[in-house]
Amino acid sequence: MAAQSDQRYIALDVKCVATGVRHDAKSRAVCFVAVIDYGENILLQKAVKPEAPIVSYLTPLSGVREGDLDGAESTEVVIAQVKALLGPDVILVGQGLVKDIEWLCLEEGRDYGGIEELADMFKTYNSRYENYTFHSLRHEANTLLSEGFLSMGCNPVKEAIASVRLFKLYHGNTVLLEEAKRKLASTRFEPSFAKRNNSLYEGVCMGGRRCTCGAPRF
Ligand SMILES: [Zn+2]
């Protein structure tokens, strides 16, 4: 395991509201950003006011309600603050980083040098269907850290802390990681938000099997 003070690893978590009815990143806008260092110190936690009108606050996912973003700073200002904390030597740690990177307009080689994607780290092979199961950060944290560690729509700071803690515990430790994967695969988890809502929430497509908006799948 790397040292407690490993400055290269930075955990990131972004929450979004919907500014369009499709499920892709273009139909979402950042409403909250959390940046945590390897020692689990909060480097930044900021609400963000999107420029585009909000179609849905996606409250069960974002935790944000109407009024919460009043007086929040602009996307541009917060992105500049995030970028000031990053650099080409930084390895980003998180779950669903590809989308977070797109939303924050981060550039590889300038804002970060690489990523550690937890969804890839914890994916489990399903021999019955001959495919991989990707687990949610909530399932990973609640199964491997402690029950109830993360709840739906909880503060992104907690999610970023969960990310860095999971990374510290399992990265580079093959034996522990394999054990963790077995636990993830054998522990019941609730269906995704998209599935429970038949891919539609307040008129906004949530993607998944019942996607009706036609935007490309990730
Ligand atoms: Zn869709």
Image (cartoon, rainbow, N blue to C red):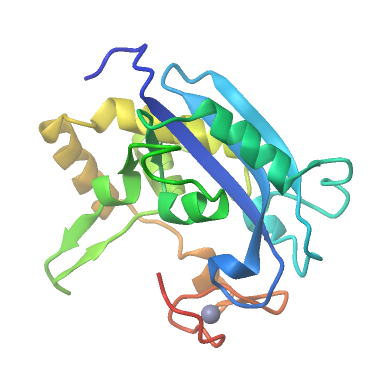
Query: Residue 165: where, in percent of width, then height?
Result: 39, 27
**Residue 34 sits in quarter:** top right
Where does the C terminus fall, quadrant-wise?
A: bottom left
Lateral position of residue 198 relative to residue 53, left or right: left
Q: Nearer the viewer, residue 89 or 42?
A: 89
Where does the N terminus fall, quadrant-wise?
A: top left
Query: Residue 45: where, in percent of width, then height?
Result: 66, 31
Q: Nearer the viewer, residue 3 or 201?
A: 3
Lateral position of residue 30 relative to residue 23, left or right: right
**Residue 35 sits in quarter:** top right
Query: Residue 58: where, in percent of width, then height?
Result: 69, 61
Lateral position of residue 51 relative to residue 204, left or right: right
Check the image and name the residue furthest to the front: 110
Lateral position of residue 134 relative to residue 43, left or right: left
Q: Is residue 47 visible?
A: yes
Which residue sits at x=72%, y=74%? 202
- How many numbered marks appear? 0
**Residue 168 sits in quarter:** top left
Q: Nearer the viewer, residue 100 or 158?
A: 100
